[in-house]
Image (cartoon, helix red, strand yellow):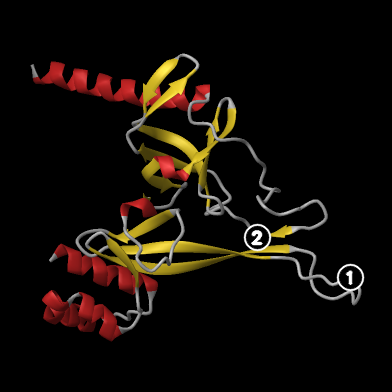
Protein backbone atom coordinates (compact mmCIF):
# COMPACT_ATOMS: atom_id res chain seq x y z
CA UNK A 1 0.00 0.00 0.00
CA UNK A 2 2.84 2.38 0.87
CA UNK A 3 4.61 1.46 -2.34
CA UNK A 4 1.49 2.24 -4.34
CA UNK A 5 1.11 5.59 -2.59
CA UNK A 6 4.74 6.43 -3.31
CA UNK A 7 4.27 5.58 -6.96
CA UNK A 8 1.19 7.80 -7.15
CA UNK A 9 2.98 10.69 -5.44
CA UNK A 10 6.02 10.47 -7.70
CA UNK A 11 3.78 10.24 -10.77
CA UNK A 12 1.83 13.32 -9.67
CA UNK A 13 5.03 15.28 -9.05
CA UNK A 14 6.46 14.26 -12.41
CA UNK A 15 3.18 15.23 -14.05
CA UNK A 16 3.28 18.71 -12.48
CA UNK A 17 6.90 19.17 -13.50
CA UNK A 18 6.07 18.05 -17.03
CA UNK A 19 3.25 20.60 -17.16
CA UNK A 20 5.68 23.32 -16.14
CA UNK A 21 8.18 22.12 -18.73
CA UNK A 22 5.46 22.20 -21.36
CA UNK A 23 4.55 25.75 -20.38
CA UNK A 24 8.18 26.75 -20.84
CA UNK A 25 8.71 24.93 -24.13
CA UNK A 26 5.36 25.84 -25.65
CA UNK A 27 5.67 29.52 -24.91
CA UNK A 28 3.37 29.95 -21.93
CA UNK A 29 6.26 31.33 -19.88
CA UNK A 30 8.17 33.04 -22.65
CA UNK A 31 8.89 36.74 -22.24
CA UNK A 32 11.20 37.30 -25.18
CA UNK A 33 14.66 36.71 -26.51
CA UNK A 34 17.80 38.79 -26.35
CA UNK A 35 21.52 38.32 -26.68
CA UNK A 36 24.19 39.11 -24.12
CA UNK A 37 25.44 41.93 -26.34
CA UNK A 38 22.23 43.91 -25.72
CA UNK A 39 21.39 46.11 -22.77
CA UNK A 40 17.84 47.29 -22.41
CA UNK A 41 17.41 51.07 -22.44
CA UNK A 42 20.81 51.78 -23.99
CA UNK A 43 21.98 52.20 -27.56
CA UNK A 44 24.85 49.73 -27.85
CA UNK A 45 25.43 50.08 -31.60
CA UNK A 46 28.42 52.40 -31.19
CA UNK A 47 29.56 51.40 -27.70
CA UNK A 48 30.92 48.36 -25.94
CA UNK A 49 29.37 46.85 -22.84
CA UNK A 50 32.05 46.16 -20.24
CA UNK A 51 31.04 43.61 -17.63
CA UNK A 52 27.98 41.38 -17.54
CA UNK A 53 24.47 41.78 -16.22
CA UNK A 54 24.32 38.04 -15.45
CA UNK A 55 24.76 36.76 -11.91
CA UNK A 56 27.02 34.21 -13.61
CA UNK A 57 27.62 34.27 -17.39
CA UNK A 58 27.89 30.45 -17.44
CA UNK A 59 24.93 28.08 -17.48
CA UNK A 60 24.19 26.47 -14.12
CA UNK A 61 22.15 23.34 -13.46
CA UNK A 62 19.21 24.29 -11.29
CA UNK A 63 16.08 23.21 -9.51
CA UNK A 64 13.51 25.98 -9.87
CA UNK A 65 10.39 26.47 -7.77
CA UNK A 66 7.69 28.73 -9.22
CA UNK A 67 4.95 30.70 -7.53
CA UNK A 68 1.65 28.82 -8.04
CA UNK A 69 0.04 30.15 -11.18
CA UNK A 70 -2.12 28.93 -14.05
CA UNK A 71 -0.97 29.84 -17.54
CA UNK A 72 -2.40 29.45 -21.01
CA UNK A 73 -0.40 27.62 -23.69
CA UNK A 74 -1.24 26.64 -27.26
CA UNK A 75 -2.36 23.23 -25.94
CA UNK A 76 -4.41 24.47 -22.98
CA UNK A 77 -3.87 25.70 -19.41
CA UNK A 78 -1.12 24.41 -17.12
CA UNK A 79 -0.24 24.98 -13.48
CA UNK A 80 3.27 26.06 -12.62
CA UNK A 81 5.08 23.92 -10.08
CA UNK A 82 8.81 23.25 -10.37
CA UNK A 83 11.56 22.16 -12.72
CA UNK A 84 14.64 20.06 -11.99
CA UNK A 85 17.93 19.62 -13.83
CA UNK A 86 17.43 22.67 -16.02
CA UNK A 87 20.13 25.09 -17.15
CA UNK A 88 19.56 28.72 -16.24
CA UNK A 89 21.23 32.12 -16.11
CA UNK A 90 20.05 34.94 -13.85
CA UNK A 91 19.73 38.35 -15.51
CA UNK A 92 20.22 40.87 -12.72
CA UNK A 93 19.43 43.93 -14.84
CA UNK A 94 15.72 43.64 -15.52
CA UNK A 95 15.03 40.66 -13.21
CA UNK A 96 14.75 37.92 -15.81
CA UNK A 97 15.82 34.29 -15.96
CA UNK A 98 17.11 32.54 -19.07
CA UNK A 99 16.37 28.84 -19.58
CA UNK A 100 18.46 26.76 -21.96
CA UNK A 101 15.96 24.43 -23.66
CA UNK A 102 16.06 22.13 -26.69
CA UNK A 103 13.94 24.76 -28.46
CA UNK A 104 16.48 27.50 -27.71
CA UNK A 105 16.92 30.09 -24.96
CA UNK A 106 13.64 31.06 -23.29
CA UNK A 107 13.41 34.09 -21.05
CA UNK A 108 10.85 34.60 -18.30
CA UNK A 109 10.22 37.20 -15.63
CA UNK A 110 11.98 36.58 -12.34
CA UNK A 111 8.75 37.57 -10.59
CA UNK A 112 7.33 34.12 -11.48
CA UNK A 113 10.04 32.31 -9.51
CA UNK A 114 9.94 31.85 -5.73
CA UNK A 115 13.31 30.16 -5.28
CA UNK A 116 15.97 28.12 -7.04
CA UNK A 117 19.04 26.08 -6.22
CA UNK A 118 22.13 26.23 -8.43
CA UNK A 119 25.00 23.85 -8.84
CA UNK A 120 28.01 24.00 -11.14
CA UNK A 121 30.51 21.16 -11.63
CA UNK A 122 32.62 20.47 -8.53
CA UNK A 123 30.89 23.25 -6.56
CA UNK A 124 28.51 23.23 -3.62
CA UNK A 125 24.84 24.11 -3.94
CA UNK A 126 23.72 27.73 -3.81
CA UNK A 127 20.17 28.49 -2.75
CA UNK A 128 18.39 31.70 -3.81
CA UNK A 129 15.07 33.18 -2.79
CA UNK A 130 12.99 35.93 -4.39
CA UNK A 131 13.23 39.39 -2.86
CA UNK A 132 9.40 39.34 -2.99
CA UNK A 133 9.47 37.07 0.05
CA UNK A 134 10.60 40.01 2.19
CA UNK A 135 9.48 43.54 2.99
CA UNK A 136 12.04 46.23 2.13
CA UNK A 137 10.98 49.35 4.04
CA UNK A 138 14.10 51.28 3.09
CA UNK A 139 14.13 50.56 -0.67
CA UNK A 140 17.63 49.09 -0.57
CA UNK A 141 16.98 46.36 -3.11
CA UNK A 142 15.29 45.98 -6.48
CA UNK A 143 13.23 42.96 -7.59
CA UNK A 144 15.75 40.14 -7.90
CA UNK A 145 17.03 37.21 -5.86
CA UNK A 146 18.93 36.84 -2.60
CA UNK A 147 21.41 34.06 -1.95
CA UNK A 148 20.76 32.36 1.38
CA UNK A 149 24.21 32.08 2.94
CA UNK A 150 22.85 30.89 6.29
CA UNK A 151 19.27 29.77 6.79
CA UNK A 152 17.12 29.78 9.90
CA UNK A 153 15.44 32.28 12.19
CA UNK A 154 18.09 34.90 11.39
CA UNK A 155 18.99 34.50 7.73
CA UNK A 156 22.23 35.81 6.25
CA UNK A 157 21.39 36.94 2.74
CA UNK A 158 23.55 38.23 -0.10
CA UNK A 159 22.21 40.67 -2.68
CA UNK A 160 24.04 41.58 -5.88
CA UNK A 161 23.53 45.26 -6.66
CA UNK A 162 23.95 46.27 -10.29
CA UNK A 163 24.85 49.80 -11.38
CA UNK A 164 25.21 51.00 -14.95
CA UNK A 165 27.86 53.60 -15.74
CA UNK A 166 26.80 55.45 -18.87
CA UNK A 167 29.26 56.65 -21.54
CA UNK A 168 30.72 60.05 -20.66
CA UNK A 169 32.59 60.69 -23.89
CA UNK A 170 32.78 64.34 -24.96
CA UNK A 171 33.55 64.47 -28.66
CA UNK A 172 34.56 68.15 -28.69
CA UNK A 173 37.37 67.49 -26.24
CA UNK A 174 37.95 63.80 -27.07
CA UNK A 175 37.71 62.89 -23.38
CA UNK A 176 35.84 60.30 -21.38
CA UNK A 177 34.71 56.83 -22.36
CA UNK A 178 32.31 55.58 -25.04
CA UNK A 179 31.72 52.34 -23.16
CA UNK A 180 28.85 51.26 -20.94
CA UNK A 181 30.21 49.75 -17.73
CA UNK A 182 28.26 47.25 -15.63
CA UNK A 183 29.36 47.14 -12.01
CA UNK A 184 28.25 44.51 -9.49
CA UNK A 185 28.50 44.89 -5.73
CA UNK A 186 27.79 42.16 -3.17
CA UNK A 187 25.77 43.40 -0.18
CA UNK A 188 24.76 41.50 2.95
CA UNK A 189 21.30 41.60 4.51
CA UNK A 190 19.50 39.93 7.39
CA UNK A 191 15.83 39.41 8.09
CA UNK A 192 13.86 40.57 11.11
CA UNK A 193 10.69 38.57 10.71
CA UNK A 194 9.71 39.19 7.10
CA UNK A 195 11.49 42.55 6.91
CA UNK A 196 14.91 42.76 5.30
CA UNK A 197 17.59 45.13 6.56
CA UNK A 198 21.13 45.81 5.43
CA UNK A 199 23.72 44.26 7.71
CA UNK A 200 26.23 46.43 9.51
CA UNK A 201 29.34 44.29 9.46
CA UNK A 202 30.85 44.95 12.86
CA UNK A 203 31.04 42.87 16.02
CA UNK A 204 28.72 45.11 18.08
CA UNK A 205 25.90 45.11 15.51
CA UNK A 206 26.05 41.37 14.93
CA UNK A 207 26.04 40.55 18.63
CA UNK A 208 23.03 42.85 19.02
CA UNK A 209 21.16 40.80 16.42
CA UNK A 210 22.02 37.64 18.38
CA UNK A 211 21.44 39.10 21.85
CA UNK A 212 19.37 36.09 23.00
CA UNK A 213 22.46 33.86 22.48
CA UNK A 214 25.18 36.44 23.03
CA UNK A 215 27.23 34.43 25.54
CA UNK A 216 27.23 31.36 23.31
CA UNK A 217 28.13 33.42 20.24
CA UNK A 218 31.00 35.22 21.98
CA UNK A 219 32.40 31.91 23.22
CA UNK A 220 32.09 30.35 19.73
CA UNK A 221 33.83 33.31 18.07
CA UNK A 222 36.65 33.33 20.62
CA UNK A 223 37.17 29.57 20.58
CA UNK A 224 37.38 29.44 16.77
CA UNK A 225 39.24 32.73 16.31
CA UNK A 226 36.58 34.09 13.95
CA UNK A 227 36.32 37.58 12.43
CA UNK A 228 32.99 39.08 11.43
CA UNK A 229 34.53 40.91 8.47
CA UNK A 230 35.64 37.59 6.97
CA UNK A 231 32.79 36.30 4.80
CA UNK A 232 33.27 32.61 5.59
CA UNK A 233 33.68 33.30 9.32
CA UNK A 234 30.50 35.37 9.28
CA UNK A 235 28.59 32.52 7.65
CA UNK A 236 29.88 30.14 10.35
CA UNK A 237 28.66 32.52 13.07
CA UNK A 238 25.18 32.78 11.56
CA UNK A 239 24.92 29.01 11.04
CA UNK A 240 26.01 28.40 14.64
CA UNK A 241 23.43 30.87 15.95
CA UNK A 242 20.62 29.33 13.92
CA UNK A 243 21.57 25.86 15.15
CA UNK A 244 21.19 26.81 18.81
Q: Residue at x 15, y 78 (%)?
A: 211
Q: Position of residue 166 (x, y in %)?
A: 70, 65
Q: Residue furthest right?
A: 172
Choose between 168 and 212: the one closer to the eye. 168
Identify the mark at residue 51; answer none if there is no mark: 2
Which element type, helix, strand or loop, lies under badge 2? loop
Left or right side of 28 for 105: right
Q: Residue at x 66, y 47 (%)?
A: 36
Identify the mark at residue 158; answer none if there is no mark: none
Left or right side of 160 for 153: left
Which element type, helix, strand or loop, lies under badge 1? loop
- Give the crowd class for mark 2: few <14, some 14-19, many >=20 residues within 10 Å: few
* Vertical position of residue 99 compared to residue 55: above or below: above
Choose between 165 and 105: the one closer to the eye. 165
Kindly report the distance in space between the C-alpha atoms of the residues bearing marks 2 and 1.
24 Å
Is the N terminus in the top left, top right, bottom left or bottom right quadrant?
A: top left
Q: Quadrant of residue 16?
A: top left
Q: Position of residue 56 (x, y in %)?
A: 54, 53
Q: Residue furthest left?
A: 1
Q: Residue at x 48, y 62 (%)?
A: 160
Q: Position of residue 23 (x, y in %)?
A: 45, 25
Q: Residue at x 47, y 20 (%)?
A: 73
Choose between 32 and 148: the one closer to the eye. 32
* Vertical position of residue 224 compared to residue 132: above or below: below
Q: Position of residue 206 (x, y in %)?
A: 26, 78
**Do callouts 2 and 1 mark residues in contact (Cβ within 8 Å)?**
no
Reading the image, the residue beneath label 1 is 171
Amino acid sequence: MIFGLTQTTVFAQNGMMQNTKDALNLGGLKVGQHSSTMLYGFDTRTTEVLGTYYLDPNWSVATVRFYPRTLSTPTGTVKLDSLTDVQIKIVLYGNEVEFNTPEGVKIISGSLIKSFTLQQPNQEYHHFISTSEFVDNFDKIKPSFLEVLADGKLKLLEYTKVTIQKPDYVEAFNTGSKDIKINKEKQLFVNQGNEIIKLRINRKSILALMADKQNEIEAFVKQNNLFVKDRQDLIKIFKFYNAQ
